[in-house]
Image (cartoon, helix red, strand yellow):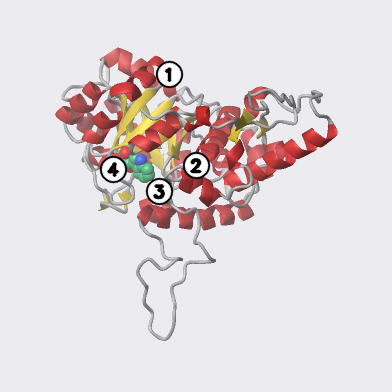
Amino acid sequence: MEATSMSASSRFSISRGICSSSAATAPAKRRLDVTPASGVIGRRGLSQRVLRFAVRAQRSEAKDSPGIPSPMSDSIANCIEVREWEMGKTIDEIAASQGITIRRRPPTGPPQHYVGPFEFRLQNEGNTPRNILEEIIWNKDVEVSQMKERRSLVMLKKALENAPPVRDFVGALRASYERTDMPALIAEVKKASPSRGVLREDFDPVQIASAYEEGGAACLSVLTDKKYFQGSFENLEAIRNAGIKCPLLCKEFIIDPWQLYCARSKGADAVLLIAAVLPDVDIKYLTKICKILGLVALVEVHNEREMDRVLGIDGIQLIGINNRNLETFEVDISNTKKLLGGARGEAIRERGIIVVGESGLFTPSDIAYVQEAGVKAVLVGESLVKQSDPSKGIAGLFGKDISK
Ligand SMILES: O=P(O)(O)OC[C@@H](O)[C@@H](O)c1c[nH]c2ccccc12
């Protein structure tokens, strides 16, 4: 496993709280205050906003009170570490340096669809998404901006004052694994997907969620993306309000902290952060906001480089290994084994990180295979949601009744 770049480069973490200008070889240790009040929640790229704020905070600290601690603006826990070389870089430059090929938004303005009297799309034209994941993210960028216009962060934070208490997502996974000695099941409430089309026509999210719970699911995953998965936040809220006890993962393409507040206000206990989309600094920042909101982050990887990146980030409790390539839709469950081998597997075990095997799991031998590889939980959608009785489908998937 390559040394995490965090150790190689000097780190800056800026906070208005601490400013210790140590001229010694050790890089200045500062922290960036990321509480919403700090104003780093912005409309455009997370990393750009976060890093611009970091530079501003550092310069003002260096000028006003070099080395003299100022009143702690917020607890250290609400801070992230940013790398010195990231300062002032654009989100795309940071992302590209970490092997992320998904661009957050079209390079120059809206996607260009009409280019003259004959409507046609040039291959690889700048404003044409390179793959479905990039198309989903570009759409999400516009969708979240529109949602924010309709419901401000202030309104969301107000709504959180009456939100139901968070349930222990990680605790539910651990308890299930200890009870059955098999991977805990996160059963997915998913009507459709870009790769498989409509999975279930007669789709009643509450009925499906209830059947999953009856069948022994430890937690549920609820798709909230409307355009590509026919999901909704209303589904999430309805399942929560129906008295389903399983903790809920809001399965969404998170690109902005506003979505975390929205998910929490609708009853989510966990959210998905996709390493193929989010640079490290965004993952750090979003997991900090999750912590403030009481949410747990399931950080999803698909390859070694993403796994090494995420293992280089402190405080990660859950890592999902997606056997499906979200850009090509290819599914290969050996991906789980590949990413849990050698030093990576050891690091995960040492840190007590729970790994969730995701996608393409249909049979008891699939479950046995990923369990052997080292997962403690599995995320399963298609093979269960298509069953006439999803509860029985769970017993079929595990080869036995795991409900008690
Ligand atoms: O339906 P499957 O093959 O059992 O996969 C479920 C789940 O892993 C999949 O829906 C998923 C995992 N990560 C995602 C990210 C975005 C959308 C969907 C997903």
Q: Are marks 4 and 1 in contact (CB under 8 Å)?
A: no
Label number found at residue 279? 2
Of the two numbered discs 4 and 3 in the rendering, the one whose residue sits closer to the viewer = 4
Inter-mark Cα distance, 4 to 3? 19 Å
Q: Position of residue 111 (x, y in %)?
A: 47, 67
Residue 298 shown left or right of residue 302 in the figure: right
Q: Residue at x 19, y 27 (%)?
A: 369
Q: Earlier in the sequence, mark 1 or mark 3?
A: 1
* Residue to which mark 3 is pinned: 231
Residue type highlighted by circle 3: Gly
Mark 2 burial class by Cα count in 10 Å: few <14, some 14-19, many 20+: many
Marks 4 and 1, how far apart at CA = 26 Å
Instruction: Classify mark 2: helix, strand or loop.
Output: loop
**x and y percentages locating residue 356 in the rendered image:** 34, 29
Between disc 1 and disc 3, the foreground one is 1
Image depth: mark 1 or mark 2 in front = 2
Q: Earlier in the sequence, mark 4 or mark 3?
A: 3
Crowding around mark 3 (Cα neighbors within 10 Å: few <14, some 14 to 19, many 20+) is many
Is the residue 173 above or below the residue 12 in the image? above
Q: Quadrant of ligand 1?
A: top left
Q: Does label 4 point to a residue whose CB lies under 8 Å from ligand 1?
A: yes
Q: Identify the residue position indicated by label 1 in the image.
A: 171
